[in-house]
Image: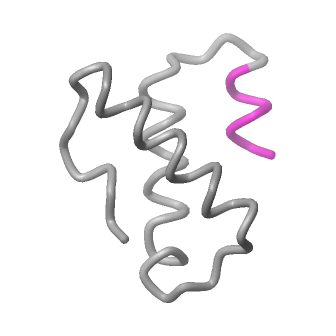
Amino acid sequence: MQSKNNLEKGNYTPKVINDLQHSLAPLARKQELSSEVVRFYLQLSQQFIERGQRGSWLSL
């Protein structure tokens, strides 16, 4: 919800996405994400890769 609110406030999108990734990565590694969030996480990471913003986004 915090990421959604930050985007709605017009905060810098790459930073919001990076913060979201850092929040989700530990849960993804421990396989503690719901199947819906895993799909969202993978879809968002794929969009990031397609834009050339690789880095450490995928932490699965």
Residue for point 61% across, 63% down: 38
The magenta stretch spans residue 29 = no
Q: Quadrant of residue 22?
A: bottom left
Secondary structure that dominates the magenta span: helix
Way the structure is coloured: one colour
Q: Is residue 60 above or below residue 2?
A: below
- Choose between 5 and 30: the one closer to the eye: 30
57 sits to left or right of 37? left
Q: How many marks?
A: 0
40 sits to left or right of 47? right
The magenta stretch spans residue 2 = yes
Residue for point 73% across, 73% down: 34
What segment carries the magenta color? 1-7
Whole-percent x and y of residue 21? 46, 52
Whole-percent x and y of residue 11? 60, 17
Which residue lies most toward the bottom here? 30
